[in-house]
Image (cartoon, helix red, strand yellow):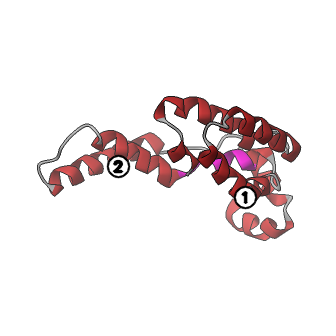
Amino acid sequence: NSIKYVPSKDYKAFTQALRKVYSAPSLKACQNAFESFKQQWTAYPGAIDVWERNFEHVEQLFDYGSAIRKIMYTTNAVESIHSSFRKVTKKGAFPNENALLKVLYLRIKELETKWEGGRIQNWAMVRNQLLLHDELKDRALRYLE
């Protein structure tokens, strides 16, 4: 939601700076990175405000190990599909609804092929970190075996 307050020319630099916040190795490092981020991007107070109001959710990520956090912030499958749909639909006008549906269907088939057999990196580490959390242990064991 913060991106809508940033001009497209600054989007890449903004997201790179933001990545340092949520991919920090510890909560303390995250908080320090966030302070630096706020100082760097004061020109966009609306974008900063979104993060300040919701920072408690970012802090919750650090209740989990680094391998679990990486999965959480890199596997938003729905957003990935939406982004892919935007790429294939932004360049043209469609004569009718069926033409658009065909393009979207073909893109889904391409994504299906691309994602087939996908694996989670460092799965053994992720599994072990999940098992360390008492509130997740029973659920994790149900799906891991």
Between residues 5 and 17, which one lies in front from this camera angle?
A: 5
- The residue labelled by disc 1 is 57
Give amino acid for label 1.
His
**Considering the numbered disc 1 on the image, is that residue within a helix, a strand or a loop?**
helix
Say which residue label 2 marks: 108
In this rendering, position of residue 109 left or right of residue 65: left
Query: What x and y, as percent, mark residue 49?
Result: 66, 51
Q: Is residue 124 visible?
A: no
Q: For the point 40% across and 43% down, which residue is it?
A: 84
Which secondary structure lies at badge 2?
helix
Left or right: 8 in relation to 104: right
Q: Position of residue 74 (x, y in %)?
A: 61, 45
First of labels 1, 2 by sequence position: 1
Q: Which label belongs to residue 117? A: none
Q: How many marks?
A: 2
Residue positioned 66% across, 36% down in the render = 41
Q: Is 74 a magenta residue?
A: yes
Name the one closer to the observer, 13 or 72. 13
Decide whether residue 72 is among the magenta residues: yes
Task: Give the alpha-carbon distance from disc 1 to disc 2, as whole Å.
Answer: 31 Å
Could you tell me what secondary structure mostly forms the magenta stretch? helix
Residue at image location 43% in from the left, 49% down from the top: 81
In the rendered image, residue 36, in percent from the top left (x then y), is placed at 77, 35
In the shown orientation, is residue 101 left or right of residue 87? left
For the point 83% across and 56% down, the residue is 63
Instruction: Sort mark 2 into few (<14), some (14-19) or many (20+) by Cα contacts within 10 Å.
Output: some
Which range of residues does the magenta coloring cover?
68-76
Based on the displayed image, in which of its 4 quarters is residue 121 positioned? top right
